[in-house]
């Protein structure tokens, strides 16, 4: 019985992120449009786009290989699993221990790996640009990410997200400077990983600037849909990661009964919405930077992470 | 001296003399070459008998003990294999007209006289006699180095002769000084030159005299050992003489001088007040090693290359004996034996190579393992062995020497290792050039036989992985003797 | 008597050293040869004296060899060679006369310093003799390395060898002395013949080193 | 029969095979099949023997002494858990390489230069692992180097190979001399060369540090630690591919075995500061190695450089183990140690696999230069799949094995706050960041490797007409690929199999993993961190296939094949695709300018000029230019200076003698 309900709850979470992801993107786009004094499409537009793409036929380059066709599914699945393993409305779900923070990062890495390969498969210049830049950005983002993990793990004594969330929620950690640094670093990494301004502009096809879009330039139809959906999920994943790591308050403890789950879910949606709003605000406020300024940008994240860790030693030793 | 018949001692000494006389008279190089081999075989057999039969008591002139029997057996063995090699080698020299039958007769006679001189030097119990014998061996080799009568050969021989004579003089002066030191203690005349008596009474000798004596002896015999900076004659003598002689020079003559050095080192060690000879040997050994190691890099003549490698190894051996102690001495002995075998094997190979390619210039020899697999790989194994790589014998001695030295005198060990590495780099550099790459030069089959080369290499290989217990015990005993 | 004998042999040995110095001082070949003849003569005298006081008759042989061979035959032969090979008569020195003399002084001092450490129970005679012999040897070597000229280098070697013989004869009751002196005379004969055969005019290695490079395989 | 005896018999069989090979290596086909078959058999037997010993872990060790080697000592051989594990690694690689060789060897144009040395090489590696006294250890070590050198020289006519062999031999001998010094120091003046005696003797911390440094020089030069790595990218690719696989995948592990054996087993607990050295060297090696690899366009050299990276990772992990052990923290120490061993195993799997793949590409196209490859995924379907597996695994991506070991290492890194020393506290996180950087760069590197050589359009005729390789090679690669996945999804089993080693060396082990629910692994405690490769795999597979099914069922499944779009511009020439150098350009611009003094020179023709624009990339291997070139120069200079002594006149030589004499006499006069 218990197992059933556990699986049920886990299923709910998977479904939740599945449904919520496009909404978040739509919401962000809407807010951005608003900030630009435009009406903008409805928040449900992403769903429509996905459905449209799904129905279209796939236009495939002659020399596209099986890898090119498999990648969308692999990528999406990897991201989805990763997203499902981040506590959203409740901690300690059945499969949380399947993977800790490092594994989640690595799962995203797998997704990126295949996407980068797919970018090179057809052998157009754009794919090459996209892949090479993507891996460069990733190469800088991952160490930063690890340092963030390290910093958090030092505070909570674990890389297990549920544990971390519970620990921080249980407000025995006061306000920590190092945690603040870690959060900023995580935000920077999230921006880079999700191809957001200022690292990349999801809305442009200007070849000199684009990274992610160039990589998936050859995709169309259901494949494109999968990839887009993956991107939505990834955004949600990072947002809920930030939320669960740094603002876990109101998250439901596992086995606390349906009611608290509902409450937790409500709170979670609110937090995600707020984060989305901030993201939109930030993106409208800043401009995209040159590709070769990105290293400095991510270097800052790296420094912050390291600084946070060292600071933690100091504060601990005091 | 009264020697009963069938006395192996007499065999080792008289067979070469008789053979020399015979060879000087007989014409026809095929016969003489065979005879030469036969005589050397007999010498080797009687040396073996010397090993097995009970040894004669040390007489006024002849001494056979654990130390020199090592040298004698090794000497007669390499003498035998070299004679086999030269039998097949020299024939080709006649064809190419570098030698005439007359010179060949002379060559064979000289070969036996040289063997006699070396055996005598090993066996003599009288330091004066030992001196005479060493010089006899030296002069015969001088004559053989010059045998090709080319300007270069004559020049080499001349250089060898002059430097050798000075060495002779030094050695003699040292010998006289030893006699002077011994006379008050041992008594006048014959006795004060008999080594067995000297070593017994050495502690009462006058240290100051002994010191000066040792300096002269060290330089005198050290010239023959080829220690830098007394080495000058060695490379040219090796490079210009007939290859069998180069093999004998590296494999044997250096050992003769080394043997003399060891005897006097023991004498010095027996006297508490005299300076410790070890320090001097260590310094000169390291100097020779380093010097030769660097000299190896710029060599263009393959025989001269290996001549310098002989200097290097003599340096290592002298260093080992200088360090002293059971391990180092054992290593030194082993290294000496292994070096004699390996280096002569290498010279057999080089002889074949230079005959085939018609040149000794390293730059003109390439890709041997392609054109002459047996010869090429033989050379590879030889050089690998001489460079101190396992599973060949020299690795064992270098292992013992380096490890024990590092435990005792780390800095010396570091210098030693540095020298070894530099030399290794040079040797392997030349080896890869000669043995590999696009083949160059003639592809004609080799004239001389590979048997001696592979015989030596097999021995070295076996020694590298398995030393028979009796040999070990015996070496350990000798190592103890050397202190 | 003993003291007298001691003085005589001592003065003879000392004379030998003195003559070695004279050799260092020579700058003409012929005079060098004459001085060497004198050197050999003195040696012969001292050997003979040793033979007399040690009443060791075999040493007379050595003395005779020294007298006949070294003091007469060799110098004459060398005179011949010089004429035949047309070696020009004055000696080119690698180091100037003055420094050479100073070096010689130093060498003698060194050999004395070394030999005087010898404990006195080795009888004084032998001790002094050795000191002188050593200096003669070193001076001979000095001649060899400071003279560029083949003949003078041979002379230097012979002087060195004289020193050896002096030491050998001074060593009381040393066996093989005669044999050794004979052996050395043969050696020297070889050298002289070698010079003559190989037409070695100026130096031992007048064969130009550069010309030998290819046969040495050392050409750059 | 004693377990060690079985191993030695296998070694004997290998040596016998080598001898036979000398005899019949002229007759190609027969010899190839026969020799590789026999080798595979021997290796398989040895592997099974060692594996059973490891799994049963009877504890203790099975020893044997042969009356050879150093006379008064004899050759000691010993099989304990550590040795057993490395024997498994060696012989697994050996068996796979032999299987691969049966097919690959057919294309060998000089079999008589490969066949005899191949079994000898394997025998040497086995013996090194088995040896139990300093002499036999070094003897086998050098024998191994020598055999591999001969294999490197197999294609000695190809340009650069002789140089590669030369550099390799010199560096190998340098390493051996360092080991020799280390053992000499351990054995002491009396010369107790037996490992038992060394283990028993007490070593002071300073001595331990000295020996550790010597081991870093000796074993490190063989394993390829920066800056001792220079020979590796030259030598490994020069050999035939299955030998390269062995050298990269296995021989470096033997070197690591040597390091573990001496530093962890013989030396006893070292000083904590020495662990710092290992950590820094390891971290630097990892990052430098993979950056070198990124700059490469030669497939095999790229793989060789990535070997350097993995060696660095392993050394970092070992350094962590040292640090924890020095502070008596048993559990984290065993965690780091197990992680290191796990990575050793993993790397031996996927690096061997990748080199096999490179060999297959070489056979199919005759090209190692990635800029002449491309599109092989269409021509070589199986190879491309297994090679992809290798790439994913080596890029440390779940659910494959590479990720598990790196995850374990990160877990160990996360334990570092418990270290008392400030230096380590602060250093370890930084090193961890370096590891993460290396991992990400590795992913980039293998995206490049796979993307350039297997994906995209063929860049040369050879690549266009490539054909799949023979069954043996494919089988060998498939087996390794399967192992990569297995070790990735069932890490618990591997960890438990490794535990006896940790017990033997550190006296402590990780908690048993195989018992846990859902086969997940929990190194320290579930609250601290856990991973379940199996579930991750299942989830991904299930959700992907569900989606796939759903979409095909309810959405479209129509496909239209058209020319590639590329924003409307389809460049006609395949040469215009991204090249290896082009792909690495962003990373080169980030790291290269500092580490390689990299600079791009573009020559743009004048407007109207139809000459092609040219891009020249300038890279400097600073390690070579700053460390080795000066050394070589110094030796050459000294040699030239001394060489003048060869051409003195006789008078010159005489004056040398004279000078020596006078000096000695002076010394005598002054001192005595």
Image (spheres, rainbow, N blue to C red):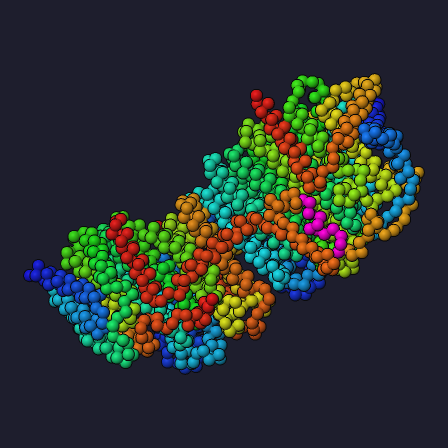
The quadrant in which residue A164 appears is: top right
The residue located at (21%, 58%) in the rendering is C105
Question: Which span is picked out in magenta?
Answer: D575-587
Is residue D585 on the magenta stretch?
yes
Vertical relation: B156 (above or below) D22? below
Q: Nearer the viewer, residue B56 or C9?
A: C9
Q: Nearer the viewer, residue D325 or D383?
A: D383
x and y percentages locating residue C176 in the rendered image: 23, 66
x and y percentages locating residue D175 in the rendered image: 53, 49
The residue located at (86%, 48%) in the rendering is A60
Q: Is residue B262 visible?
A: yes
The answer to whether residue A88 is left or right of residue D81 is: right
x and y percentages locating residue B335 in the rendered image: 43, 56
Q: Nearer the viewer, residue B171 or B115?
A: B171
Q: Among all residues in the image, which is located at the extreme front?
A: D607
The residue located at (80%, 56%) in the rendering is D572
């Amino acid at each position: 019985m218990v197992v059933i309900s556990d699986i049920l709850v886990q299923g709910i979470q998977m479904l939740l992120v599945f449904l919520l992801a496009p909404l978040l993107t739509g919401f962000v786009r809407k807010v951005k449009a608003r900030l630009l004094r435009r009406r903008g499409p409805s928040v449900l537009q992403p769903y429509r786009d996905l459905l449209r793409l799904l129905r279209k036929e796939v236009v495939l380059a002659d020399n596209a290989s099986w890898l090119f066709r498999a990648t969308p599914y692999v990528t999406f699945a990897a991201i989805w699993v990763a997203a499902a393993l981040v506590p959203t409305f409740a901690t300690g779900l059945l499969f949380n221990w399947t993977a800790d923070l490092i594994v989640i990062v690595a799962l995203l890495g797998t997704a990126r790996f295949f996407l980068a390969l797919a970018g090179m498969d057809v052998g157009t210049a754009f794919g090459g640009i996209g892949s090479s830049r993507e891996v460069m950005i990733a190469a800088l983002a991952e160490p930063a990410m690890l340092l963030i993990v390290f910093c958090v793990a030092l505070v909570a004594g674990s890389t297990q997200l549920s544990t971390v969330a519970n620990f921080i929620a249980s407000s025995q950690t006061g306000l920590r400077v190092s945690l603040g640094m870690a959060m900023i670093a995580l935000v920077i990494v999230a921006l880079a990983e999700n191809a957001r301004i200022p690292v990349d502009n999801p809305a442009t096809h200007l070849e000199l600037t684009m990274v992610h879009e160039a990589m998936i330039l050859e995709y169309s139809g259901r494949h494109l849909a999968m990839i887009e959906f993956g991107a939505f999920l990834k955004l949600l994943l990072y947002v809920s990661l930030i939320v669960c790591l740094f603002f876990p308050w109101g998250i439901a403890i596992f086995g606390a009964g349906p009611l608290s789950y509902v409450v937790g879910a409500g709170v979670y949606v609110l937090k995600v919405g707020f984060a989305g709003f901030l993201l939109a605000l930030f993106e409208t406020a800043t401009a995209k930077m040159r590709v070769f300024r990105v290293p400095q940008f991510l270097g800052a994240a790296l420094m912050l992470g390291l600084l946070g860790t060292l600071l933690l030693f100091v504060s601990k030793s005091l | 001296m009264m020697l009963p018949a069938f006395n192996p001692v007499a065999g080792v000494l008289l067979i070469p003399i008789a053979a020399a006389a015979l060879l000087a008279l007989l014409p026809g190089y095929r016969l003489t070459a065979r005879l030469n081999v036969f005589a050397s075989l007999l010498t080797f057999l009687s040396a073996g008998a010397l090993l097995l039969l009970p040894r004669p008591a040390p007489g006024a002139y002849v001494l056979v003990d654990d130390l020199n029997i090592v040298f004698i057996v090794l000497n007669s063995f390499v003498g035998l294999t070299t004679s086999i090699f030269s039998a097949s080698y020299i024939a080709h020299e006649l064809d190419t007209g570098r030698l005439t039958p007359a010179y060949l007769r002379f060559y064979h006679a000289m070969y036996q006289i040289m063997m006699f001189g070396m055996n005598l030097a090993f066996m003599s119990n009288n330091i004066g006699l030992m001196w005479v014998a060493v010089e006899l061996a030296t002069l015969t080799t001088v004559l053989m180095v010059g045998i090709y009568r080319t300007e270069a050969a004559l020049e080499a021989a001349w250089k060898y002769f002059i430097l050798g004579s000075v060495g002779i003089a030094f050695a003699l002066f040292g010998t006289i000084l030893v006699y002077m030191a011994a006379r008050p203690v041992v008594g006048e005349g014959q006795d004060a030159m008999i080594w067995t008596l000297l070593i017994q009474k050495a502690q009462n000798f006058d240290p100051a005299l002994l010191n000066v004596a040792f300096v002269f002896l060290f330089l005198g015999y050290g010239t023959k050992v080829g220690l830098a900076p007394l080495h000058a004659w060695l490379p040219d003598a090796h490079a210009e003489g007939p290859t069998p002689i180069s093999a004998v020079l590296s494999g044997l003559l250096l050992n003769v001088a080394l043997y003399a050095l060891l005897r006097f080192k023991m004498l010095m060690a027996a006297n508490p007040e005299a300076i410790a000879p070890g320090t001097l040997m260590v310094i000169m050994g390291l100097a020779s090693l380093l010097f030769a190691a660097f000299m190896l890099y710029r060599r263009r003549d393959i025989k001269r290359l290996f001549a310098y490698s002989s200097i290097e190894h003599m340096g290592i051996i002298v260093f080992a004996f200088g360090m002293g102690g059971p391990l180092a001495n054992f290593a030194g002995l082993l290294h000496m034996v292994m070096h004699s075998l390996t280096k002569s094997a290498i010279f057999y190979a080089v002889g074949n190579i230079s005959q085939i390619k018609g040149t000794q210039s390293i730059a003109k020899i390439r890709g041997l393992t392609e054109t002459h697999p047996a010869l090429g790989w033989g050379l590879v194994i030889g050089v690998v062995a001489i460079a101190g790589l396992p599973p060949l014998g020299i690795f064992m001695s270098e292992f013992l020497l380096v490890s024990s030295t590092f435990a005792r005198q780390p800095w010396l060990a570091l210098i030693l290792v540095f020298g070894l590495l530099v030399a290794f780099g040079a040797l392997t550099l030349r080896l890869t050039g000669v043995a590999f790459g696009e083949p160059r030069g003639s592809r004609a089959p080799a004239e001389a036989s590979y048997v001696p080369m592979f015989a030596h290499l097999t021995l070295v290989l076996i020694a590298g992985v398995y030393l028979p217990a009796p040999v070990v015990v015996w070496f350990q005993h000798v190592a103890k003797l050397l202190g | 008597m003993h003291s007298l004998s001691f003085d005589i042999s001592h003065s003879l040995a000392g004379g030998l050293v003195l003559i070695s110095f004279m050799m260092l001082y020579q700058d003409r070949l012929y005079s060098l040869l004459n001085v060497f003849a004198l050197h050999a003569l003195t040696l012969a005298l001292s050997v003979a004296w040793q033979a007399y006081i040690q009443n060791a008759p075999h040493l007379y042989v050595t003395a005779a060899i020294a007298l006949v061979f070294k003091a007469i035959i060799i110098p004459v032969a060398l005179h011949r060679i010089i004429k035949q090979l047309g070696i020009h008569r004055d000696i080119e020195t690698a180091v100037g006369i003055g420094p050479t003399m100073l070096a010689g002084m130093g060498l003698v001092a060194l050999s004395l310093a070394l030999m005087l450490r010898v404990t006195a129970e080795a009888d004084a005679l032998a001790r002094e003799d050795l000191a002188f012999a050593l200096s003669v040897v070193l001076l001979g070597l000095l001649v060899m390395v400071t003279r560029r000229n083949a003949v003078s280098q041979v002379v230097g070697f012979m002087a060195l060898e004289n020193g050896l013989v002096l030491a050998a004869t001074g060593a009381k009751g040393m066996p093989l002395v005669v044999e050794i002196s004979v052996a050395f005379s043969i050696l020297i004969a070889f050298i002289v013949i070698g010079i003559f055969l190989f037409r070695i005019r100026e130096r031992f290695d007048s064969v130009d080193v550069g010309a030998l490079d290819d046969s040495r395989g050392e050409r750059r | 029969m004693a377990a060690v005896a079985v191993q030695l018999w296998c070694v004997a069989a290998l040596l016998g095979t080598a001898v036979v090979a000398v005899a019949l290596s002229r007759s190609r086909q027969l010899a190839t099949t026969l020799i590789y078959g026999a080798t595979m058999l021997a290796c398989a037997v040895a592997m099974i023997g060692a594996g059973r010993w490891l799994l049963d872990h009877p504890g203790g060790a099975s020893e044997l002494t042969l009356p050879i080697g150093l006379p008064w000592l004899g050759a000691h051989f010993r099989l304990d858990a550590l040795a057993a594990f490395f024997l498994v690694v060696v012989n697994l690689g050996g068996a796979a390489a032999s299987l691969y060789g049966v097919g690959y060897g057919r294309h060998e144009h000089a079999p008589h230069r490969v066949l005899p040395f191949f079994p000898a090489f394997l025998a040497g590696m086995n013996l090194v692992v088995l040896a139990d006294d300093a002499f036999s250890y070094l003897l086998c070590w050098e024998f191994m180097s020598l055999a591999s050198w001969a294999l490197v020289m197999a294609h000695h006519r190809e340009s650069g190979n002789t140089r590669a062999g030369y550099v390799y031999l010199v560096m190998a001998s340098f390493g051996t001399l360092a080991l020799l010094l280390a053992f000499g120091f351990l054995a002491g003046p009396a010369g107790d060369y037996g490992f038992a005696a060394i283990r028993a003797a007490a070593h002071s911390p300073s001595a331990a540090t000295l020996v550790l440094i010597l081991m870093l020089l000796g074993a490190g030069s063989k394993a390829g630690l920066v800056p001792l790595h220079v020979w590796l990218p030259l030598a490994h690719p020069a050999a035939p591919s299955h030998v390269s696989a062995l050298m990269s995948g296995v021989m470096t592990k033997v070197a690591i075995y040597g390091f573990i054996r001496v530093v962890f087993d013989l030396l006893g607990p070292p000083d904590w500061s020495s662990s710092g050295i290992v950590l820094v060297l390891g971290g630097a090696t990892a990052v430098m190695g993979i950056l070198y690899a990124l700059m490469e366009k030669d497939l095999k050299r790229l793989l060789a450089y990535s070997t350097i990276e993995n060696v660095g990772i392993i050394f970092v992990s070992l350094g962590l183990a040292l640090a924890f052990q020095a502070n008596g923290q048993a559990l984290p120490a065993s965690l780091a140690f197990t992680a290191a061993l796990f990575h050793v195993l993993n790397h031996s799997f996927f690096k061997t696999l990748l080199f096999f793949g490179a060999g297959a590409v070489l056979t199919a196209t005759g090209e190692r230069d990635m800029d002449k490859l491309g599109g092989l995924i269409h021509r070589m379907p199986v190879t491309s799949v297994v090679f992809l597996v290798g790439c994913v695994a080596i890029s440390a991506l779940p659910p494959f094995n590479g990720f598990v070991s790196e995850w374990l290492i990160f877990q160990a890194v996360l334990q570092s706050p418990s270290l008392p020393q400030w230096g380590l506290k602060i250093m370890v996180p930084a090193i961890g960041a370096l590891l993460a950087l290396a991992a990400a760069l590795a992913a980039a590197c293998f995206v490049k490797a796979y993307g350039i050589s297997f994906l995209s359009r063929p860049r040369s005729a050879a690549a266009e007409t490539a054909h799949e390789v023979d069954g043996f090679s494919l089988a060998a690669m498939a087996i390794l690929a399967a192992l990569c996945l297995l070790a990735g999804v069932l890490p618990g089993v591997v960890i438990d199999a490794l535990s006896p080693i940790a017990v033997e060396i550190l006296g402590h082990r990780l908690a048993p993993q195989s018992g846990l629910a859902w086969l997940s692994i929990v190194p320290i405690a579930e609250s601290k961190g856990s991973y379940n490769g199996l579930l991750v795999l299942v989830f991904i597979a299930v959700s992907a296939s569900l989606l796939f099914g759903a979409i095909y069922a309810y959405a479209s499944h129509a496909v239209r094949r058209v020319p590639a779009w590329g924003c409307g511009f389809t460049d006609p020439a395949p040469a215009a695709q991204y090249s290896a150098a082009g792909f690495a350009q962003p990373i080169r611009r980030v790291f290269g300018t500092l580490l390689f003094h990299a600079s791009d020179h573009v020559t743009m023709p004048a407007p109207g000029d139809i000459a092609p624009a040219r891009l020249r990339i300038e890279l400097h291997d600073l390690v070579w230019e700053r460390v080795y070139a000066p050394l070589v120069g110094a030796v050459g200079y000294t040699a030239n200076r001394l060489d003048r002594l060869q051409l003195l006149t006789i008078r010159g030589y005489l004056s040398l003698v004279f000078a020596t004499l006078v000096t000695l006499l002076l010394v005598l006069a002054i001192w005595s």
